[in-house]
Amino acid sequence: MRHNPSTSVTSKFVHTSINKNRCPVNVVRWTPDARRLVTGAHSGEFTLWNGMTFNFETIQQAHDSAIRCMTWTRSDQFLVSADDHGYVKYWQQSLSNLKVFVAHKECVRDLSFAPTDSKFVTASDDGTLKLWDFATATEERTLTGHGWDVKCADWHPHRGLIVSGSKDNLVKMWDPRTGKSLSTLHGHKNTIGQVKWNRNGLWLVTASRDGLLRLFDVRTMREVQSFKGHKKEANAVAWHPIHETLFSSGGANGEMMFWQVGADIPEGTVEYAHESNIWSLDYHPLGHLLSTASNDHTTRFWTRNRPGETLHDRYSVGRDDWKRLKDGLEQVALYMAGGGEEGEVGKAVAAMMGGVGMSGMAVGGLGLTGDDDDDDALPGLPGLGLPIADSSIPGMGGGPSVQRARDPRDPRNSLRGGGTFSRGGSTSSSRAPRRGRSRSRSRSRSPRRSSSSSRSRSRSRSPRRDSYRSGRDRTSGRDRDSYRGSGRGSGLRGGSSLGSGSNRSSQPSSQEVCGRHGNVQWNSSNCR
């Protein structure tokens, strides 16, 4: 993992968490112990989620307006949050409030701490950045220079250097000691949504509403690379905590992408990660989980997928295509259970799904999950590592032959031949050799009946009038042992006691061939 960033792409869906008070989730942050996740919502609530089971733990009203940003101190001892009304609050790890004060007259969009935790910076829609002393909560300096709302800010991880992005399409560098602008970076054509320093302190990535992500090198103050892939605005970015060259981004259409410095195409894409804007992303400190917050009221967890695995869940292919894929796989499973050939699976899927095939699909790790419960299971597919149902599907054709268990207490199994019954109505035996010419009748043809048998069935259906009482075969009048061959017309098992002519038994048999259904019936008078 440490030597191959491509194996750390967290594009596999794990869980969706939804607050009972449904509202947009604006920001997510992992706790310092990495066991829980804190989310800040548009309703002003903190929600605490278990980071291992993803279950809800607690909720509390933290602000009176929408929470726009929150971050932990670099020492991980305190949490600081800000809201739409310009208020900033300090919190302990237990989420007990320590202090509250008004920082700006308008919405506070972002805040970031200095490497020493002694100071922090806030960015506001009033067009200014402010420096604050953390211990005393007093303002030290106001940074002015942007011509419009300041949407984001980030303090350098090692130096006294602040970067900010604004609605004026500009990225500015600031000296916190003097409050002066050091440099202005151009390139974006729309609002800068977020700026983030890499942990090496050399690279800076910016996300803009023009749909582009740009990487700058602070040593030259020039753009190193531009990342194109988002179809709409790019709202959020997050660097991987282990791999310096890997970062993720979230877009306005709910699309999530993974990028590696130096590569022209994304390392991974989850096109339908959310149904609306992704406002925030945050990696677990170990890098194996990624959490996302969205305007669709949900918080979602993502993990690494297996190498070479192609995901076909609804977050990768879309809700509509996912439902078509799921329905297609269910139909194929039924088709295969009905006797279809394994080689026809791909054709069947393509036909049922309008051309969407199964190329590259790893059934063992499909992530074939439902809409919300994410626990829907599909029937097994032969040849793909999953079992199929062992019974035929009505209306889908005859399935493979499956032998039925014989109950010794069942009077229908009283014949000493001991043959087994296969689907389709024929009997088979492995004991006595067949005598006479083997006859086979198709299912559509009805065996001939003797006139006495016909009159018997039309009058009273009395068992004493049945031609089987005389030891003669009902179909043609020949002795029953001459019909001991294979095929669907055979009325008795080859291993019965009716061997030679001298040993014929005159006892009545309860087995006969139904002329209506073409299968073995145990009492002709009960066949309807």
Image (cartoon, grey):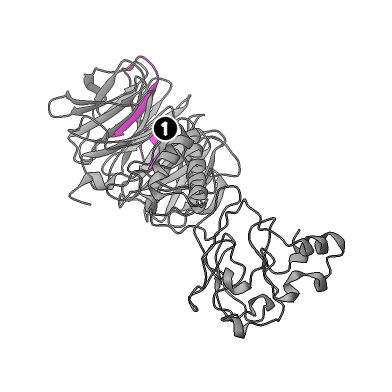
**Residue 404 coordinates in the image, percent (x, y):** 56, 69
Q: Is residue 112 magenta?
A: no
Q: Residue at x 52, y 42 (%)?
A: 327
Q: Is residue 212 left or right of residue 384?
A: left
Which residue appears farthest toward the left when viewing the image? 220
Q: Is residue 441 above or below residue 239?
A: below
Q: Residue at x 54, y 78 (%)?
A: 495
Residue 508, quarter of picture:
bottom right
**Residue 381 coordinates in the image, percent (x, y):** 44, 52
Q: Is residue 355 left or right of residue 466?
A: left
**Residue 523 coordinates in the image, percent (x, y):** 73, 69
Q: Mark 1 — residue?
A: 355
Mark 1 lies on a secondary structure that is: loop
Residue 68 visible from this viewpoint? no
Locate the C terminus by quadrant.
bottom right
Q: Is residue 220 above or below residue 244?
A: above
Q: Residue at x 37, y 34 (%)?
A: 111
Mark 1 surroundings: few (<14), some (14-19) or many (≥20) residues within 10 A: few
* Numbered range of the magenta stretch: 133-156
Please state which of residues 8 and 377 is positioned toward the viewer in this rendering. 377
Q: Is residue 425 left or right of residue 215?
A: right
Q: Is residue 106 above or below residue 332?
A: above
Please state which of residues 85 and 345 is positioned toward the viewer in this rendering. 345
Tell me the amino acid under the disc marked 1.
Gly
Please state which of residues 125 and 350 is positioned toward the viewer in this rendering. 350
Q: Is residue 127 above or below residue 485?
A: above
Q: Is residue 150 magenta?
A: yes
